[in-house]
Image: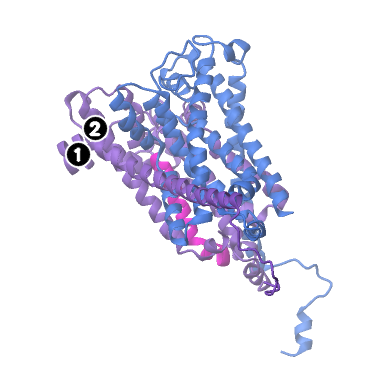
Amino acid sequence: MSPTELSAGFDPTAPLTPSGNLRRRQFFSRFTEAGATGAAVLAIAVLAIVIYTVVSRGAGAISWDFLTTGEPTGIAPALVGTATIVVVATAISMPLGVLIAIYMTEFAGPRTTRGMKTVLDLTNGLPSIIIGLFVFGLLIKPLEKQMAFAGSVALAIIQLPLIARGSLEVLRLVPGNLREASDALGVSRWRGVVGVILPSALGGIVTATILAVARAAGETAPLIFASSVFDATKVSINPFEALPNIPVTIFFLSEEGNPAGFERAWGASLVLISAILFASLGARALLARNRERMSR
Amino acid sequence: MLEPASAPDVRPPQRNRSADRLRRIDRIGDGLLYGICAFACLLAVVALLLVAYEVVHGATPAISKFGLSFLTSTTWQPNFGEFGAGSLIFGTAFSSFFALLLGAPIAVAIGLFLSELAPKGVRNVVAPLVEMLAAIPSVILGFWGILVLAPFVHSRIEPFLHDTLGFLPIFGEPQTTGASVFTASLILTIMIVPIIASISRDLFLAVPRDVQDGASALGATRWEVVRGVVLPSTSSGIVAASILGLGRALGEAIAVTQVIGAGTQIKASLFETGDTLAGRIANEFPGAITELHKASLFYCGAILLVIGLVSNLLAQWIGRRFDYAQVAK
């Protein structure tokens, strides 16, 4: 083929649009791009529909009485109960989680760290109903009564891997020169950890804890075992008795099939979901701000 | 070091009492910190072992009575002391695999959208929203499932699927209500999509940019870059993420028990009611009176525990062989 022959089929004034095989390939590529975008839109649409339903059906139930009185008009005891259970759980899991993360970054060798990571992942992967069975066998069956504390123990096990993994990530982000500076000044290990490393990782630890609280607050399965037979008329914060709580309240109301109960369940769902979404949004904002500060 | 050695009045090294005390405190402090950190780790390990022990211990009466035939028997009659988890194991596998079949492609597509297509601004909005889907408590998702999703599925989707794909036995005749294995699978899909999507997004972001650019420079379209470079190099990670999602679906109790309709038989159709191991525990444990009934539910829990631990270890093992993930971590 001579150059003149080649240029004979080539029209320099023609628009540069693909044809034939290339056109087909590009069309298919666009098609898959549209599919991927559609999948993301679908996920957000489902989120929007769920939240819209909860808000539109729950808003009617919300009133001052609903939030401040007990059964049959309100859910105040359940609100206080959930708060108590989650606070006790966090009081157990947060110190343990942070200590585990410190051990993994400051003391353990690579093999121990990998082993602990596996343990945390396995704990994280335990179905929550299994943890419910566990606290039933460990605490409720021997003591022969339900108590909120058993629920807190179960939620603490659910929170523990989340807090430990989150803290581990921020402890790893603490700049090496901070550590070295404190070592160079002859500061002992524990003073370095308490005075230098923990304060600079505090934001991330708080974020991880808030996310774990948000996760635990909606957990239902363990509480069916630990705290499901309760007196929902009066407010109590005694963790050694069964406390009314929001998730189990919603679960029982949804199983009953009574329209008035459904309305209260929607109201309780709205309260729970807004608390959880605000907490995780706040945690995310905190994390973003923290990342910015650390990378500066 | 540079002190003149000939200095006449070099005082003998005097022990400074307060420095001494400081050193002692530091030694105790170091030991104490190490001690409580190691103790916390030990506690986490013990907790995991104790969970396994308690569940198996609670199941012992049922294990010694029914043995392994519990896994295959399909009679579940608490009034007659007859228990078998065959139909529950079937229901668990059926609903979870269908959810994975539906959810994994969607989740991978979302991961691709977030890592390859979305500009940074869009990604920073969409990614948290998708993860927020995972933050919705399962009890609320299940409640929404009964009152909103199930009627819609029953009146629209099930008849449509039955009419168009009814020759397949899994798309049988729709039943009287929307409580079905199909609805449960949809709820499970909603739960596992954000998990798989966020893991696969991280995987895709870890694929080196220059390899993708190289493919583009050779004339590959965007899809061909994904098909030829991104997906093959992340396939084992995607499998690991899917197994994690599957593990989550297998163990979900509350939402499933709300929408699946507590059926007791093995049916090939997705539109029939069914039940899962976890769902049966959540549904019957509060009302279980006899020891054998409770022990049988514990037995279901033990099966679930084994499935959960095995799938998790499998996911870790597959994920560990994956190179880019190691680089990213």
Q: How many marks?
A: 2
Q: Mark 2 = which residue?
A: B295
Label ID, residue B261: none
Q: Mark 1 = which residue?
A: B63
Name the one closer to the observer, B303 or A48. B303
Write down the chain letter for disc 1.
B
Q: Where is A83 relative to B211, above or below? A: above
SS state under label 1: helix
For badge 1, the amino acid type reads Ile
Q: Is residue A115 left or right of residue B302?
A: right
Q: Is residue B249 left or right of residue A272?
A: left
Name the one closer to the observer, A28 or A86. A86
Q: Where is B251 relative to A149, above or below? A: below
According to the rendering, which colour does chain B have? purple
Contact? badges 2 and 1 (CB < 8 Å): yes
Q: Which residues are magenta?
A: B227-251
